[in-house]
Amino acid sequence: MKPLKKIAIVINASKPGAEDLATGLEQLAKSNGVSLIKTSEFPCPSGFIEGVDACFIVGGDGTLLGMMNEAVRYKVPVVGIRHGKLGFLATFSPEEMEDSLPVLFSGGYRIRYRSMIEYQDAGGMSKLALNDLVIKSGTNGRLARFSVHMENERVADFGCDGIVFSTPTGSTAYNLAAGGPIVHPDAQVVMMTPISAHTLTSRSVVFPAGVSLQIKALDNVDDPLVSADGQPAFEKIPDFPIQVTLAEKTFPLLELNDHSYFRVLRNKLKWG
């Protein structure tokens, strides 16, 4: 790949030590002839990363997820410098920066295009999620009832705490905690995993790209809560049904040529 000439650094200053980590990144970039712009304003100012070769994000996976829309809009690949404990998206740990970043700056990288979910409520406003869309009971301790349809065919009705609709990237997030499968990020699928379903035979279902899922709320006491990548999915209470599809747009994630997804899994999940 072509060497990186200009990068953006986005710092989540709320993370202790993130500023010092960003300073080390800045010094590495300059010593390798890479120009840069940086900001500690988070969320990042709109348009800040336009025209750069890559965006380096100092923070955890949540910080990286917060840059999703800007990265997709300007087609700028993202590099995560991990400043958290369990993140699967962040490409490098602070300890790896000095050895790995010069290789990356010189062009020793590849860009992986991660699939995303596109979702919208009955009002028609569509949005994107990189990890997941989660629809939950609006009342703590009370089951919610939902009906899920694929196109015009009913999949099932669920009495549960909620349902996670996940991308392969998000399969190691809430989906995994709810008992769903781990899916390789190159797969083009959407997972549906009920959360604490009342029926013990309720299990995850994997849907192929190209299908549309509709989620209807059934006789719930309170309006269900809907979140996308850990944040409120809509500015106001959404109108059901909610539609979920695999998005046509993708999220560009930059990684070293020798990056191994399974090595990350072994390290993060303490596999043998």
Image (cartoon, rainbow, N blue to C red):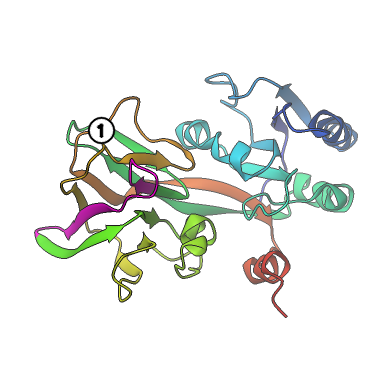
Count of marks, rendered view: 1
- Residue bounds of the magenta highlight: 134-152
**Which x, y percent locates residue 126?**
28, 35
Which residue appears at 48% of the width and 64% of the height?
A: 186
Q: Residue at x 55, y 34 (%)?
A: 66
Q: Is residue 73 left or right of residue 95?
A: left
Of residues 256 and 245, which is closer to you in this image?
A: 245
Does residue 215 appear to the left or right of 9 in the view shown?
left
Residue drawn at (24%, 61%), measured in percent from left and top? 158
Tell me the quarter of the picture where residue 192 sits: bottom left
> Going by the picture, which residue comes out furthest to the front?
141
* Label 1: which secondary element: loop
Q: Which residue is mark 1?
A: 238
View extreme (bottom): residue: 272
Return the residue found at the far left.
Answer: 152
Q: Position of residue 202 (x, y in %)?
A: 30, 71
Question: Is residue 122 found inside the magenta-colored segment of the image?
Answer: no
